[in-house]
Image (spheres, grey):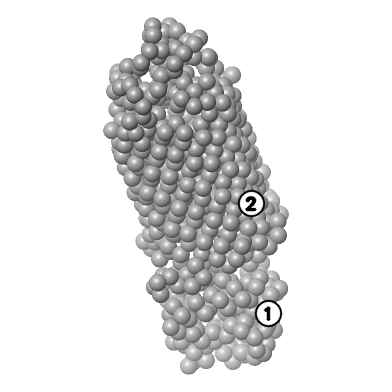
Amino acid sequence: MNRYILVPGLLALFALAGCTEKLVNVQPYEMEYFAQDKMRFTPLEERTAFETHIDSIREASAGGSSGFQGGCGCR
Amino acid sequence: MGMGHASPRSRVHLPLILFLAAVLTCTMHSLSFAGMAVPGQAAPDFVLPGLFGGQTLSLKDLKGKVVLLNIWASWCTSCKEEMEDLASVEEQYRPRGFALVAISIDNAPSSAVDFLKRFENRTKKKPGFVFLYDKDKTVSKDYRQRSMPTSYLIDREGIVRKVYPGSFSKSMLETLKASIEEALK
Amino acid sequence: MTRKILALFVACMLVPIWPVFADKPRDGISYIFNFYGDNGNNRVIAPSVALSKKLSDTYYLGANLGVDAITSATKKTSTTTSTASGEEGGDEAGNLHLRVPASLSLTYDKDDDTLTGGGYYSYENTYTGRSLFAAYTRRMNLNNTALGIAFSKSFDNWIPDRQLSTDRRSERALDMTLTQLLSPRQSMQFVFSSLQSEGFLAQPTDAFVTSAFTIYAQYPDTRKGSAAAVRLVTLLNEPTSFHIYYRYYRDDWHIQSDTVNLELYRDISRSLVLGARYRYYRQSASFFAKPLNAYTPSDPLVAVDYRMYAFHSNTVGLMAIVKPSRPLLRKFDADKLKLKLSADVFTTSKHENIQYLYNTDRLTGLFASITLEYDF
């Protein structure tokens, strides 16, 4: 099991390590599209939650879904 | 096919990776704000058209006034939420030589115009802001905007006094008012 | 009486979809109506209310309360292997069960950090579900990058009709997420999940009945699995976005699966977004799955549920997001209201266990969702 944590851990470290400026592909004032429902990772959030439950009773697999929705980052 | 058991060495790797990630995360924070408009510097000038049509306006035209420059968009929820509070601030300080310049950076100006119409219908008030439209987002680039929204307090001499990244909370509004009072002296 | 669908609904409310934000957390309320029905004569009507209330500039309270009305059919025995089951005979009785799930959470949101913690509880006359969950998200690189980690642990109990080796069932899930904006029109997300279960993991009512014997489903006491998923969202042109999602799952029961989900959304007008989706799922069998007729009472592990076998399924669906263009009833600001609708149809491949359990060679069903969102 640890290699399944090491690999994503390494990925996260790579994302962080000295690449900050290169990872800024979108400026805060360019985020208009990500504020739209159709550009969110799960535009229909409650339906996704219900569907995840359906899948867990109709299938033997689970996981792979995140609550992170994306968006414009407006604070 | 089983998952295997962790060796003692890989048990050490995981906390180490997480620790390094946490350290890098902490140091990233300061880097991401490099290049913001710095208080004490002259505010970059701009020439922009009015959001509702009409004449263009430049920052130079407002010299002698204390200006709060607010860069916003109709797709930005927190930008819309703070508008009512900012309208109150503008109304309070306008007689003393204060101007609030709200620059919309929407891709289409009609989005900003539609929102403002709904805002007026709901609040029964028309904000006394100077509404401008920046199609190419040049002000955002010139002012190195790092969050949405961002406000810049500019004194009568055209110097940036304060930068306010993000929307105004209730406590930050009081801080803003104190800064405006100071700049109006 | 068969309570498969009912117990499974209860048992699998393990990892709530808590909101983990790039924008500020929502300050609003959602009224949700969910429906599920399939040709195994199972029905679920699940209305609920979800509240996310701003307490201060940094704290938000989340609360969910629902009522699930679940109707399931009595089990029909296989005509090739058995006489009447030990249960009440006849056609489906359509017995109604109620389950009440509730959850409470607190979110701390400041600058680049969001932390959520909470608990979940549900009760129904055959199962009690309890879980605790926590999630943390760190945004970086001017909101271009987000790292998230979420953990949940459940402490559930069966309330069975018969003696079980244990009535405990607990699960823990760990999700790690990396989100990255690639351009103003494209974003990507990686998710890794680690899952672990222990306790009585089969359905207490699953049984294979013959004229000579009855054997109940018996699974291993523990199960460890992991899933890795990638999601890409692209703006094809101004009104159209395309979503693609792939997940790979595997566990120590030797079940492996692939899931592909494709979605297309298009702005029809300022007020209306329409979408369509297709999902494909396939999985392999567990190591202890074998043809039903091959089981004997001496088998330590027995699978009756088709989900322990190899099968695949297809799902198609339609979605709509409606935003009013003018104030509703002159009172509700149009900017604050949103209506979301969806309807999906799924169908599985044929399998003898589906035939045995549901008297139909494949499962076909519909699930629909209506949500009304209002922001304060």
In the rendered image, is residue A58 in sight?
Answer: yes
Q: Image check: B126 left or right of A30? A: left
In the image, residue C176 above or below residue C139: above
- Of badges 2 and 1, nearer the viewer stands 2
Tell me, yes or no, whether dots 2 and 1 are on the same chain: no
Which residue is labeled 2 in the image?
C264
Q: Image check: C332 left or right of C322? A: left
Query: In x, y percent, where is residue C44?
Result: 39, 40
Query: In x, y percent, where is residue C68?
Result: 35, 42
In the image, residue C109 above or below residue C277: below
In the rendered image, is residue C180 in sight?
Answer: no
Which residue is labeled 1 in the image?
B44
Residue at the image point whose x is 38% and y is 44% from the top: C45
Q: How would you rate the neighbour count of disc 1 (Cα within 10 Å): few for under 14, some for 14-19, many for 20 or more?
A: some
In the image, residue C215 above or below residue C19: above
Chain ID at mark 2: C
Residue at the image point whose x is 33% and y is 31% from the top: C93
